[in-house]
């Protein structure tokens, strides 16, 4: 529901599962279905993307058909918040071109200082840190991740790891940035919806299923092409495919050079940031009471009894207010 907000057709048709009265008012008199795209033949045989598999399930299609691009409707406030995040990082790094990097998919886990992904959809930590070290010298970098990971300190070329829990604000940050580098995760789909450009690295999953092959705005690096085994997610629970795919996202120096070339091609030559970041001003006089039912301002009076311990301001003078 979060990404449907403001959508011209989907917003009024979508509900959070905790919506008040959802069952009694909307579901009780209807048949309920639970589409499972991962069990669609076209999907697990790489004939359909995830969106097309949903289309087959919901709209009873016999095969995958071309679909419209996804869309996200961002409000003015959301756009301003994302723009401010990007402007602050430009000012901090003194670099005008901004790269958003999403290193991990949703299955990433962290145990102490170790970060890993049993599904092999996320970047390997050593690979992504090497890419960051190379690209940070030319471009401002924003890390899009729920978990933090060690990045070497570098005052001359800092890397931003903002804590942004709202996915819509992340969409706004991507909108205000120059390019995106990511893996099999939500970021690339936001890029597609916003008409931006992306460099996407995949391992254990097929680009035909989870990304946008042959899209002019996407450079896809299929690291696991020659070694992966299809992992039948939500069809079986065997762990052998994941075990066989454990090295699918591990790439060598040649792959790293090619990925960096893609990013540099999309971003172009580095440009010094000549603009100005103006932080948001917090106006102490702004009313935060939506009802505007302003009563007297009570202030404690030193040395008074408990029943006369407060005074309110009226006409510029303090007057004691006690119990009768």
Image (spheres, rainbow, N blue to C red):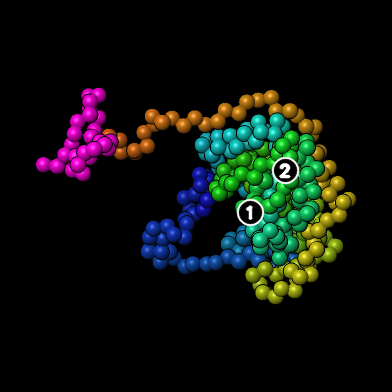
Secondary structure under badge 1?
Answer: loop
**Residue 147 marker:** 1
**Residue located at (67% from left, 74% from top):** 237
Image quarter for residue 267?
Answer: top right
Q: Give the labeled residue for mark 2.
A: 153
Q: Residue furthest right?
A: 254
Position of residue 225 in the picture relative to residue 153 (left or right):
right
Q: CA distance from mark 1 to mark 2?
A: 18 Å
Q: Earlier in the sequence, mark 1 or mark 2?
A: 1
- From what the image shows, is residue 32 above or below residue 278? below
Residue 68 position within the rendered picture, expressed as x and y whole percent measured from the top left: 64, 48
Residue 323 position within the rendered picture, expressed as x and y whole percent measured from the top left: 14, 42
Confirm whether residue 139 shows in the render: no
Classify 10 Å Cα crowding around label 2: few (below 14), some (14-19), many (20 and above): few
**Residue 309 marker:** none
- From what the image shows, is residue 230 above or below residue 182? below
Confirm whether residue 278 shows in the render: yes
Q: Which residues are magenta?
A: 298-324
Position of residue 309 in the picture relative to residue 113 (left or right):
left
**Residue located at (66% from left, 42% from top):** 160
């Amino acid at each position: 529901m979060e990404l449907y907000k403001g959508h011209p057709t989907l917003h009024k048709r979508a509900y959070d599962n905790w919506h008040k009265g959802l069952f009694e008012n909307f579901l009780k008199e209807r048949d309920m279905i639970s589409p499972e795209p991962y069990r669609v033949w076209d999907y697990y045989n790489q004939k359909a993307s995830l969106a097309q598999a949903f289309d087959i399930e919901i709209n009873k299609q016999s095969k995958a058909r071309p679909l419209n691009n996804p869309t996200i409707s961002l409000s003015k406030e959301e756009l301003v918040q994302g723009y401010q995040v990007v402007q602050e990082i430009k000012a901090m790094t003194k670099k005008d071109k901004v790269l958003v990097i999403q290193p991990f998919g949703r299955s990433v886990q962290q145990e102490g200082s170790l970060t890993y992904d049993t599904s092999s959809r996320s970047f390997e930590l050593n690979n992504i840190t090497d890419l960051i070290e190379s690209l940070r010298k030319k471009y401002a970098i924003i890390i899009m991740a729920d978990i933090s990971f060690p990045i070497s300190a570098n005052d001359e070329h800092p890397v931003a790891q903002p804590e942004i829990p709202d996915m819509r604000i992340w969409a706004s940050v991507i909108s205000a940035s120059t390019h995106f580098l990511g893996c099999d995760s939500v970021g690339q789909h936001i890029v597609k919806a916003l008409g931006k450009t992306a460099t996407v690295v995949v391992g254990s999953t097929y680009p035909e299923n989870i990304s946008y092959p042959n899209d002019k705005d996407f450079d896809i690096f299929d690291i696991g092409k020659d070694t992966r085994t299809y992992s039948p997610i939500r069809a079986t629970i065997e762990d052998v495919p994941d075990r066989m795919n454990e090295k699918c996202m591990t790439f060598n120096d040649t792959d790293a050079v090619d990925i960096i070339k893609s990013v540099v091609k999309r971003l172009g030559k580095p440009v010094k940031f000549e603009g100005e970041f103006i932080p948001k001003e917090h106006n102490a006089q702004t009313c935060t009471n939506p009802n505007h039912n302003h009563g007297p301002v009570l202030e404690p009076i030193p040395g008074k009894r408990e029943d006369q311990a407060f005074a309110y301001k009226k006409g510029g003078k303090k007057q004691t207010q006690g119990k009768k």
